[in-house]
Image (cartoon, rainbow, N blue to C red):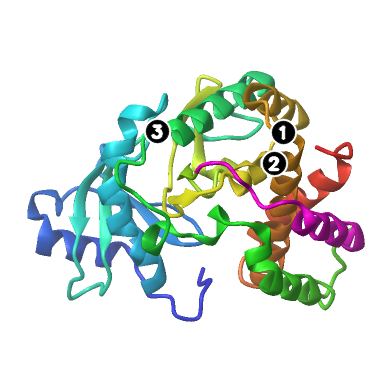
Amino acid sequence: MTLHANEIPVDEAVVRALLREQRPEWAELAVAAAGAGTDNRMYRLGTELLVRLPRTAENAEAVRKEQRWLPRLAPHLPCLVPEPLHEGAPGAAFPLAWSVYRWIDGAVVGPDSVTDWATFGAELASTVRQLHEAPLMGAVRGGELGWYRGGAPAAVAEPFAEYFAQARDLPEPVPGLDRLWEIWRRGLELPAPAGRQVWLHGDLKPSNLLAREGRLHAVIDFGGLSVGAPDAEHATVWDLPAEARAAYWAELRLDRATWLRARAWAVGIGIGGVTYYWDRDPAFAAECLARLRSVLDSPEGW
């Protein structure tokens, strides 16, 4: 499925051509599609490896960032993260940087893979805390580490207002859109985050979390890795059941302003996902709508 106008097509033949050119010792291993996200396509290579190819030139900017920082962050985290094994260079078959990682066994987080949502919420919170407490090791916000989700909501007020306007023109109405707009607007009125800047994963949605034996096992896809304020980091917990959110909140002891800014981010990012992916990827747009319904159904204030 093509999601972006400037997307570069790939298939198993492209993967094999890249391997023959750059890692011939892997070129005869079995290659099989292993899923796709909004920014990358993945292929399993043999039984121990994963090839990840960015969809666009903009997405490719994350490749070297992950190669540089993931090995340095991994020792500070309690769960597995992707282990880069090869930094692929542009080749004749594919004009962008790409990566090979060690394969991580696990199931995408969901009702079939998590046995206790409260425990899972606490485990995720502990992982987030340790990521946010990891030393910056000279990293500063800006450039490749300056993704918008590490800033204040006010910095994206204009484009997010446009997302809400576009949402009103969708073929089907977004439930509770007026209330969602009010939640976003109130988030803009809150004081900007004043704490120290920290490491941020940037997109801790369930599809970027792997479970094993019912517990959190790995965090994947660090394409949104950045340094900044942690508010938007917490936005994806509205993708999880209420008991997971409650345990997450209790474990991190977030103050009310941080939580309300996180809720505003959950709404703004969700609306952006609905409008952009409505026709491009209806399944992902539906995930964004589910997040918005979760916000609407949650008690006021959390």
Which residue position holds label 3? 134
Helix, strand or loop status at disc 1: loop
Which residue position holds label 2? 258
Note whether residue 158 is visible: yes
Question: Which residue type carries mark 3?
Answer: Ala
Q: Residue furthest bottom?
A: 5
In the image: residue 206, left or right of residue 27: right
Residue 116 against residue 141 in the figure, above or below = above
In the image: residue 246, left or right of residue 168: left
Within 10 Å of disc 1 (Cα), the crowding (few <14, some 14-19, many 20+) is few
Dots 2 and 1: beta carbons under 8 Å?
yes
Residue 154, position as x, y percentages in the image: 68, 63
**Disc 1 to disc 3, how far (Cα)?**
21 Å
The answer to which quarter of the image holds residue 255 is top right
The residue lying at 74 percent from left, 52 percent from top is 264
Question: Which residue type carries mark 2?
Answer: Thr
The residue lying at 62 percent from left, 30 percent from top is 112
The residue lying at 73 percent from left, 62 percent from top is 271
Give the magenta-colored segment's residue range.
176-196
Report the magenta stretch's main SS: helix
